[in-house]
């Protein structure tokens, strides 16, 4: 059995050289960059007894911070999914003046330092800001409230949806829409029954990426959030606060929970995406 | 359902895809639109389907204006060259699509839809593939499913755009026969586009030959082969020998030498003489309108294909019966059994 395995690997090495080298590099690189820091994080949290760990997590402030982070990140990702799809549709399907410019603008949240984005957003939505003033007149307060966090998370997440869905929509054969139309489908039926199912895997990937980014976002959020404990304090900020108080174990406990929850959600979306992809085999 | 097209014009930029096309399609016939690529045949088909709109002209179905309706209202079955099946749906759901998207008021119940899809899959002889996905089918199977899907809406007209263009030669031949017999069975007015003359002549009741956005000839397969209306049709359909000639006072000249051929009342000037390869009758030297030296001979089953250099220097290819026994180096006389001369 072992002999068979060794010879199978040896055979693979002959047909496609470089397996040993690339596999070795891949494993060591992933270990140094990702796995060892994560292991360190878990180790640090084991300094706490389970009761201590539980006390930190179940404290009101921690729970609220996690709720704000995950809840708003998910809501922002959903908004990005809808608006991102519409933007992709316009960019791919129509030719209009300034299309290339708009296409480039989509990448701005990728490139902009998050602190710059945070400062810009908070001054824009502040009570005297260009958008903040008219909104305040309507009784809507954005800056220094959870709504501000939501806006910042939408801002940084949008390119993830657009850039994942764009190439897939570009490759979608316009003939399938013509086929649906000639079979009597309305435009709406064509979108719901033909186009969206074809885009589903890409949409789910975009959703997952936008969500992951929003959960981890720190720089742009803290400027606009107001950072009121229990109301507009995000989990990453709470971690930073605990660190500055030299409560390292507390910080790592929150970090571990964020890590686990993020992983579970990403894993679930990944499975969902694979399921959707299996239903649309590529030729 | 009859289709009438009047003076249709469609331009893409400065390129005229359709340049004044008139056509009448009879009820229940199977019509082929035949032409080289860029001749406008697909554009014509797409305008009839409602997938494209003309710049000028009329399209009517049974006398009523079709251009007032979109593709959705026209009730036209369209089959695409590359199938355009819905990848995320099973074969069954692909065929059922047209029935499921009907307005609620006329939509059939689930049992009726299932029965109808089953009938259609039986019709295209692929009922055993109902649960598969399009990616699991061969090209020929996909195209039959695409046809079943188009027939599901009980179309008034069936339009097929190069339906066998993406298939290999053997499958293409099978499907041709199959389409012919299917049409005999269901009798829906059908138009198919092809650039393959053999396909058009074998399958269609009538053939429309197109070139450069214009119709060159409309006729039965025999008509377009036996009595081509234009020089283009003669050279596009079947193998032809083409010689540049001069018509001058009722005399046809090739180079300097007059030929013993009637000028068919053509006006004086430069003309082109067309003869089918097998219509050149080989005789002894000195007989016939032409004389030439045989250069090469190749045998294809019952015929000999010979390359002959005429006394004027032109080289032509002729098909002689095998038992004629031509050999390289022979000097022969050639007499066209039938020929056509077109001005220009």
Image (cartoon, coloured by chain):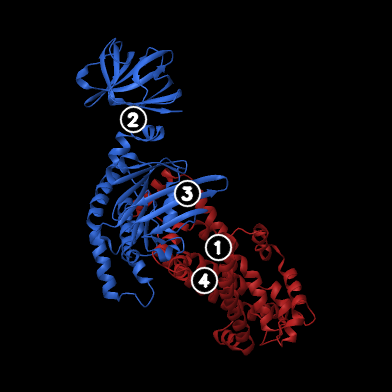
Chain colours: A red, B blue
In the rendered structure, the residue with mark 1 lies on which chain? A
Say how many tags the image has.
4
Q: Are marks 1 and 4 on the same chain?
A: yes
**Residue linked to disc 2:** B239
Which sits earlier in the primary sequence, circle 1 or circle 4? 1
Q: Are marks 1 and 2 on the same chain?
A: no
Is the Cβ of the residue at disc 3 closer than 8 Å to that at disc 1? no
Near-viewer residue (B125 or B32) = B32
How far apart, in angstroms, are the residues tagged by discs 2 and 3? 58 Å
**Residue linked to disc 4:** A266
Q: Position of residue A168 (x, y in %)?
A: 51, 59
Most extreme residue toward the bottom is: A60
The mark found on residue A164 in the picture is: 1
Residue A93 appears in the rendering? yes
Q: Secondary structure at mark 3?
A: helix
Near-viewer residue (B243 or B294) = B243
Q: Position of residue A61 (x, y in %)?
A: 64, 87
Q: Secondary structure at mark 2?
A: loop
Q: Secondary structure at mark 4?
A: helix
How far apart, in angstroms, are the residues tagged by discs 4 and 2? 65 Å
Q: Which is closer to the viewer, label 4 or label 2?
A: 2
The mark found on residue A19 in the picture is: 3
**Residue in the picture at 53% in, 49% down:** B11
């Amino acid at each position: 059995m072992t002999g068979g395995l060794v010879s199978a690997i040896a055979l693979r090495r002959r047909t496609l050289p470089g397996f040993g080298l690339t596999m070795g590099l891949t494993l060591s690189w992933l270990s140094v960059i990702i796995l060892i820091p994560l292991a360190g994080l878990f180790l640090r949290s084991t300094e706490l007894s389970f009761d201590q760990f539980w006390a930190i997590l179940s404290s009101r402030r921690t729970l609220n911070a996690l709720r704000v982070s995950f809840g708003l990140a998910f809501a922002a990702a959903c908004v990005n999914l809808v608006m991102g799809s519409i933007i992709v549709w316009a960019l791919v399907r129509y030719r209009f003046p300034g299309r290339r410019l708009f296409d480039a603008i989509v990448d701005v949240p990728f490139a902009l330092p998050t602190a710059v984005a945070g400062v810009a957003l908070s001054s824009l939505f502040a009570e005297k800001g260009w958008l903040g003033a008219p909104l305040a007149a309507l009784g809507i307060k954005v800056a220094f409230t959870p709504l501000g966090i939501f806006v910042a998370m939408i801002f940084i997440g949008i390119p993830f949806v657009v850039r994942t869905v764009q190439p897939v929509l570009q490759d979608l054969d316009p003939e399938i829409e013509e086929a649906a139309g000639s079979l009597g489908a309305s435009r709406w039926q064509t979108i719901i029954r033909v186009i969206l199912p074809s885009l589903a895997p890409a949409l789910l990937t975009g959703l997952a990426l936008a969500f992951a980014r929003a959960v981890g976002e720190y720089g742009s959020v803290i400027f606009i959030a107001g950072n009121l404990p229990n109301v507009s304090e995000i989990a990453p900020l709470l971690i930073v606060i605990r660190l500055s108080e030299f409560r390292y174990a507390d910080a790592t406990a929150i970090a571990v929970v964020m890590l686990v929850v993020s992983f579970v959600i990403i894993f679930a979306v990944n499975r969902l995406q694979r399921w959707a992809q299996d239903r649309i085999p590529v030729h | 359902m009859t289709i009438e097209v009047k003076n249709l014009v469609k331009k893409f930029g400065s390129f005229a895809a359709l340049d004044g096309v008139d056509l009448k399609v009879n009820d229940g016939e199977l019509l082929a639109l035949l032409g080289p690529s860029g001749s406008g045949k697909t554009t014509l088909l797409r305008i009839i389907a409602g997938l494209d709109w003309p710049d000028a002209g009329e399209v009517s179905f049974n006398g009523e204006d079709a251009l007032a309706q979109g593709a959705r209202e026209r009730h036209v079955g369209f089959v695409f060259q590359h199938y355009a099946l819905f990848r995320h749906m099973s074969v069954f759901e692909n065929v059922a699509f047209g029935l499921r998207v009907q307005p609620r008021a006329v939509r059939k119940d689930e049992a009726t839809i299932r029965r109808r899809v089953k009938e259609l899959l039986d019709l295209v002889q692929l009922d055993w593939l109902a649960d598969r996905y399009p990616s699991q089918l061969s090209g020929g199977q996909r195209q039959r499913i695409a046809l079943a899907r188009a027939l599901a809406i009980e179309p008034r007209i069936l339009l097929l755009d190069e339906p066998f263009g993406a298939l290999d030669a053997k499958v293409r031949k099978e499907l041709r026969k199959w389409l012919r017999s299917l049409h005999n069975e269901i009798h829906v007015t059908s138009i198919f586009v092809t650039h393959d003359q053999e396909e058009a002549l074998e399958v269609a009741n009538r053939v429309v030959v197109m070139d450069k956005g214009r119709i060159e000839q409309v006729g039965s397969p025999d008509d377009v082969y036996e009595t081509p209306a234009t020089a283009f049709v003669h050279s596009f359909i079947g193998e032809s020998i083409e010689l540049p000639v001069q018509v001058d006072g009722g005399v046809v000249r090739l180079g300097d030498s007059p030929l013993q051929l009637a000028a068919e009342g053509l006006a004086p000037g430069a003309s082109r003489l067309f003869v089918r390869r097998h219509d050149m009758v080989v005789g002894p030297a000195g007989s016939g309108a032409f004389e030439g030296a045989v250069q090469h001979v190749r045998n294809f089953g019952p015929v000999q294909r010979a390359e002959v250099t005429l006394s004027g220097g032109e080289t032509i290819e002729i098909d002689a019966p095998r038992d004629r026994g031509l050999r390289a180096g022979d000097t022969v006389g050639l007499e066209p059994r039938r020929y056509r001369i077109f001005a220009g």
